[in-house]
Amino acid sequence: MASQGQLWSRGTECVAKYNFAGSATHDLPFKKGDVLTIVSASRDPNWYKAKRSDGLEGMIPANFVIPSTDGSAREAPPVHTSHSRQAVKLQEMPWFHGKMSRDEAEKKLDVIKDGLFLVRESNNFPGDYTLCVSYDKKVEHYRVILKNNRVTVDEEEFFENLVKLVEHYQKEADGLCTRLRTPVDKEGKHEVCVDLDAFKKAGWAIRRKDINLGPLIGKGEFGEVFQGEHNKAKVAVKSLKDQTHDLQKFLAEASVMTELRHRNLVSLIGVSIDGTPVYIVTEYMAKGSMVDYLRSRGRAVISKQNQLDFARDVCSGMKYLEEKNVVHRDLAARNVLISDDNIAKVSDFGLARETKYVQDGGKVPIKWTSPEALRQSKFSNKSDVWSYGVLLWEIYSYGRVPYPRVPVDQVMQHVEKGYRMDSPDGCPDSIYRIMRSCWEKEPDSRPTFAEVSKHLAAISA
């Protein structure tokens, strides 16, 4: 990614480091080794308008190209591309069982095997944890205290998270009754965590002093969102409200974003971890959420072409997630942001996960969630397709709440009986057909995002 405030100048020549097929009509496809000339910067620092040697122009991702070695490139400012940054991986915690009583833990550990262990949430001290260890035919329960974003058993040695704590006591007892030897794995989906230091090692850490907070512009799942400035560029800054309980979930969203780079996904700029609260810094989207934009502008401002562009933009971003095997789980107009030049970008990856992690329920937005996800907690790219159909309905109804006149607690019952929303007033039949295909009861009967993208490309406003 081009660093904020360091833009390539017009006329700079660059060489393609990878093949780029393009995923939107305005993208410029190229092959590794092609020489491209920068035409202009865009509002998104990750993308430039460029020209191929055959004269064709379009948008290119900055991290797919490097400066040429000829004279014109030498005059250009240095560019730090995102390939120098690494993805921050989630760490599984198979031995973490969440809410579990003392008696249940002892039954799980009722095996004559020293060092058998698991970790659960503390019942007596909400927010803390309990490390349960089998030793000498009985089970010892150690309180794990969460203090200043770190965990400790003895308040002498502190660890960044539960994974680090467990790894330490697997090497040595260090005051416990025995060394941790054999974990009792939780059945089903495993919880995950991420290291704060991993963002530093992967190159995503931003110094707190380089961030200037501006006005409050919204509230997210974990806290407040501010307009800000980083290296003279406008940014959005998510501030974690509850450091004690939500830090890992907050960091999990950022970790997912370190693996994603697409013109129709809100880009992560970095994470500020050298102070309290922790900040997630992303690109700034001047026109706010799609649902607010649709409602405030309405038919008088938003054209048919705008609607089709929004539909294509979101589909393009979701097609990329589909290719990466990432499931969003919370796709809706409220979680799509609009840039100053009317580009729609998918955001809010708080629930997004790689496919292998997705099998849990939790809080779900009923009106946007597919039947199999609601009933069986089966989330997939095809459940995202269902949500995309609902988002299309939002676009073409100018931000109305889906399933009007149907109480939330009755939506699932109606849908399972075959009810589907009618076409919004003025919605083209071709778009409504896409909506209905997204709402097929069986996931395998729904189109992929790649297929939807092809249908949208054939539609004219």
Image (tube, rainbow, N blue to C red):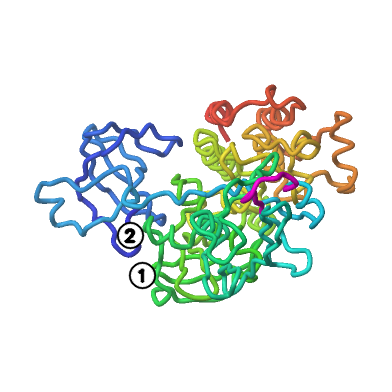
| Quadrant position of residue 43 | bottom left
Residue closer to the observer: 434 or 407: 407
Residue closer to the observer: 398 or 212: 212
Q: Are marks 2 and 1 in contact (CB under 8 Å)?
A: yes
Q: Residue furthest front?
A: 136
Is 187 placed above or below 46 here?
Answer: above
The residue where tag 2 is placed is 3
Q: Residue furthest top?
A: 445
Q: How far from the left and from the top, in percent, is residue 56? A: 29, 35
The residue type indicated by label 1 comes to: Asn
Q: Secondary structure at mark 1?
A: loop
Q: Is residue 188 magenta?
A: no
Give how far apart the Cα atoms at labels 2 and 1 are. 9 Å
Residue closer to the observer: 270 or 336: 270
Q: Determine the residue positioned at 59% across, 49% down.
A: 93
Q: How far from the left and from the top, in percent, is residue 221? A: 66, 61
The residue where tag 1 is placed is 231
Q: Determine the residue positioned at 69% across, 30% down.
A: 438
Q: Is residue 116 magenta?
A: yes
Q: Which mark is residue 268?
A: none
Q: Point out the stretch of residues depicted in magenta.
A: 109-118
| Quadrant position of residue 458 | top right
Count of numbered circles on the image: 2
